[in-house]
Each structure stands twice: as C-alpha cells, then as structure tokens.
Image (cartoon, rainbow, N blue to C red):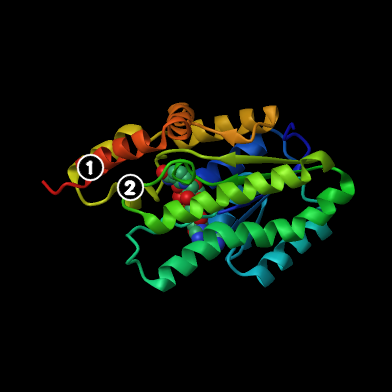
Amino acid sequence: MEIKGRVVVVTGGASGIGAAMARRFASEGAERVIVCDIDGGAARSVASRIDGDAFTLDVADEGATVEVLGEVEAEYGRIDVLCLNAGIPTGGSVDATNEDWQRTWDVNVMAHVYATRHALPGMLDRGEGYILTTASAAGLLTNIGAAPYSVTKHAAVALAEWISVTYGSRGIRVSCLCPMFVSTPMLDAFSGHTDAMRDWVEGLAIDVDDVADSVIAGIREETFLILPHPAVRDYFQHKALDYDRWIAGMQSLNDQVTRAE
Ligand SMILES: NC(=O)c1ccc[n+]([C@@H]2O[C@H](COP(=O)([O-])OP(=O)(O)OC[C@H]3O[C@@H](n4cnc5c(N)ncnc54)[C@H](O)[C@@H]3O)[C@@H](O)[C@H]2O)c1
C-alpha cells in the first residue's frame, strides 16, 4: 500500500517511533495523520507541525478509543491505516506487581484488541485496510530484564499474526514492527543498571528515522514482519531451528549484561 492519500491514525504518536512515523506519513502525502497519545500536549505539538489532528487518548480505555476512532471516521469517512504503536516498557521479573503486569497487558495488548475491534468492520466493508502494530524484537526473541514487556510483546505479535491469517483474504493487510533498540525516551528503561547493559543497548540502538524508513518500505511491500534491525531475522530463525541452543546463548548474554560491576 502507498501512504499517499490515506487517512492514518498513529497511537503513541507524541514521541519517539510514533512521532517519526507520523512525520514520515505526512511527508509521504497522507490525506491526514491523526496523532493520539496519553500526552495530549505532546500529541498536539507533533500534529501541529504536520497539519494533522491530535487526540488525548489512553489506549487502554476502550470507550475512549471507540470515541476517538469514531470521530476520525465521522470527519474523514474512513481509517485506512491504523498504527497501534503506544506501548510501555515494564521491566522486572515475575515479581513485578500484579498492577504492573495488568497495565502492561492492557496497553501493549488489549489496546490492539480494542482499536482493531472498532476499525475492522469499516475496513472489511471497504474490502481494504492496513493495521500496523508496533511489537518489538522482544516479541519474537525476549527482552533481558523485562518479563512483563517480553510476554506482552509476544502476545502483540500473536494477535497481529492471527488478524492477518483471519482477515487477509478479505483485504486486511497487517504488518508487525519488531525493532530491537531505538533511540527514544523509552531506551532508558531498557538500559538497566549496569554499564554492560547500557553499552549493549546503546550499541544496538538505531535512529527513529531509520525505523520510519523501514515502516514505509514494509507497508509498500506489505510484509508481515518489519525488521529495522536485519539481524533479528537471523536470531528468530536460529531460535526456531534450535530452541535449546538459542536459550543457552541468551542465558550467557543475560549473565554478561546483568552482572554487577
Ligand atoms: N525504543 C525502543 O528501543 C523500542 C524497541 C522495540 C519496540 N519499541 C516499541 O515502540 C513503541 C513506541 O515506543 P518508543 O520507543 O517510541 O517510546 P516513547 O516513550 O518515545 O513513546 C511512547 C509513546 O507512547 C505513549 N503512551 C504510553 N502509554 C500510552 C497509553 N496508555 N495511551 C496512549 N499513549 C501512550 C507515550 O506517551 C509516548 O508518547 C512502543 O510500543 C515500544 O514498546 C520500542
């Protein structure tokens, strides 16, 4: 799909990857880019620079999501591209609090259910629509030091995959964006507390505009996986080919980057 002339909604569009995607969609000639974020002021600031619209939205609130998407459909007649990008980087082990697990599930997974549930009927009626979810390489591999994040991102990949399998023959295209580290405010959460972890994360981090390039190419080619770090494809293949070997390798990496100096 080409972005030119499309009505595009981006959640988590006020910062980082979402803001870069919103800017790129505008420069690709989208009819309108709608920036939604829990931080309404920052969403307005991104939208004002690309002649877009902004909404304050907590994506974990289904009622609010229905209202915002309904307003967009009323104004522009349709949603062509729905980018479900808002996410939170909850770290910790199984001992993260139940509240943290639940909030991470609600934002990283249920928000995709809510928005898709509302946007899908119109897309199916028109026989076309594009859903792009921002999961993470953590959803294909894992994220050291962050159980709630890794588990919910796996679920986000699973949901995107299921939607694609189920509705692909009815014109619904789905891409799942799975970057490793990207230089955004979220990176601090991944950097952990050791120098080794920080060096590892920073060494792999790419710029948001590189992610936006991959997104445009992925949507144009309509590929399911969009992998701004090409090595993720190799790691994913290694994991599938020999799970035990992959886990052994990840155990070494875990010990290496989490060891206190
Ligand atoms: N930065 C990375 O290294 C990295 C790597 C892989 C995947 N991701 C994913 O990319 C997406 C964007 O992250 P980013 O790195 O640009 O981070 P970011 O912190 O720069 O942006 C995240 C945005 O989401 C918004 N947000 C958070 N909770 C929300 C909610 N409940 N409702 C609406 N908006 C909400 C924030 O206000 C913020 O504007 C996330 O889903 C993240 O998990 C990030």
Badge 1 marks a residue whose secondary structure is helix
| The one of 136 and 66 positioned closer to us in this rendering | 136
In the rendered image, which residue does mark 1 sit on? 257
- Whole-number angstrom distance, CA of label 2 to CA of label 1: 9 Å
Q: Residue at x 73, y 60 (%)?
A: 117
* Identity of the residue drawn at 43% across and 27% down: 231
| Residue 166 percent across, percent down from the top left | 75, 46
Q: Relative to 220, is 255 above or below?
A: below
Q: Is residue 174 left or right of residue 21?
A: right
Q: Residue furthest left?
A: 261
- In the rendered image, which residue does mark 2 sit on? 144
- How far across and how far down the image is residue 196, in percent? 20, 40
Count of numbered labels shown in the rendering: 2
Instruction: Kindly indicate whether the residue at mark 1 contacts the one at mark 2 (C-beta within 8 angstroms).
Output: yes
Q: Is residue 85 visible?
A: no
Percent from the top left, x then y, of residue 241?
A: 46, 30
Q: Earlier in the sequence, mark 2 or mark 1?
A: 2
Residue occupying the point 43% across, 34% down: 239
Q: Position of residue 96 (x, y in %)?
A: 35, 66
At label 1, the amino acid type is Val
**Quarter of image, res 53:** bottom right
The kind of secondary structure element at disc 2 is loop
Residue type pointed to by label 2: Ile
Crowd around label 2: few <14 · some 14–19 · many ≥20 (10 Å):
many
Q: Nearer the viewer, residue 195 or 91?
A: 91
Indicate yes or no: mark 1 CB to ligand 1 under 8 Å.
Answer: no
Figure quadrant of the N terminus = top right
Crowding at dot 1, Cα within 10 Å, few <14 / some 14-19 / many 20+, comes out as many
> What residue do we see at 32% from left, 59% from top?
92
Residue 19 vertical position relative to residue 224 in the rendered view, above or below: below
Left or right: 131 in relation to 121: left
